[in-house]
Amino acid sequence: MRPKRLLLATALVCALAPGTWLRSPPPPRALQAEARLTPIETRRVSRGPFTLVEGWELSGDPLRFGGFSALVALPGGGFLAGTDTGRRLEFDRPDHGRRPGVFGPFESNETAYKNGRDLESLAVDPGSGIVWAGYEYRNSIVRLDAALRPGEEVFPALMADWSANSGIESLVRLSDGRFLAIEERPRRWRGSRHMALLFAADPVEDSEPQSVVIDLPAGYRPVDATPAGEGRALVLLRRLDWGVPPGFDTAIAEVDVDSPSADGIVAARMLAEFGAAIPRDNYEGLAVTEDADGMHLWLISDDNFMSFQRTLLLKLRWQPREKARE
């Protein structure tokens, strides 16, 4: 492997690995709360039922801003993003205005190490505004009220052996009120089947979730999910590309928890592999909005706190009746 390729590949792998200095929290200091969204140039390109419409680069506190691993659309029309260092960003839709976002902690313990505040997934009740956060390492789900104040935390027994650094990467409240949590790590090395839990209702209240196996396209890992109607969810997929320079491939698949196969496996249906159709980056957050002009998919990227990556927000038009990737 060429030296430059090896160096960049090593940096990316280290950024995704647990306990590395790249993910260690910075020394305590006053956090800069304002976050900016700057439009970026995009090309209107389609893949399957998705068409890239607009894009923005997000920036903020020079030491602590970044690491976004989850995204949900809030009832009031804005967004909430979470980071794998336990922080949150609340911001208005940038296609509707230019006000800065507000960046701050989810919990008061800003000095805790990554293994205590590694937030990787968010879910929201669009009616009440209640939010649920999935934490790796802790293998837990925390419920927050509509003002985003942390409340009860549960540690589902069926999640106890999920990987510390690739566990509850996806948590989604389905349109019918059930919740689906998906483990990022496959059950077997380089496998395609991932363990998941299906909660009949609020995961803080449901102590006996159903164990489910999700079969995803080979080579990809699930990094977020968003509701797509009834028992269906769109799942954001990521794959490490060992090219020169190394980077990430992004795709979207759909799962329907009510349509398992005869052996009980829920197979995902690939909708689109984006390749170079969108700016290539480490997209880890996914949300859907229903607007007057149709449905839109939103992606946010995790910059891994590395200088050669960015925090990007993309808006894509979603036409569900368009043909998916064969």
Image (tube, rainbow, N blue to C red):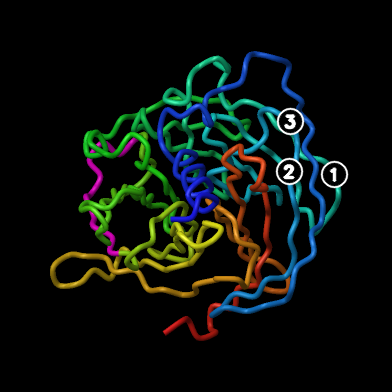
Mark positioned earlier in the residue sequence (2 or 1): 2
Q: On the image, which quarter does residue 168 sit in? A: top left
Asked if residue 86 is positioned above or below residue 76 in the image, the reply reads: above
Do tag 2 and tag 1 residues touch (Cβ < 8 Å)? yes
Cα gap from disc 3 to disc 1, whole angstroms: 19 Å
Between disc 3 and disc 2, the foreground one is 3
Give the image location of residue 254, x and y in percent. 42, 68
| Image quarter in which the N terminus is found | bottom left
Task: Give the amino acid at mark 1.
Answer: Arg
Instruction: First in sequence, mark 3 or 2: give its number.
Output: 3
Which disc, if any, is residue 99? Answer: 1
For the C terminus, the image quarter is bottom left
Q: Are marks 3 and 1 in contact (CB under 8 Å)?
A: no
The amino acid sitting under disc 2 is Phe
Give the vertical position of 2 relative to 269 (above or below): above
Left or right, 199 with respect to 19, comes to left
Would you call the spot at circle 3 few (<14 residues within 10 Å), some (14-19), or many (20 or more)?
A: few
Residue carrying label 3: 62
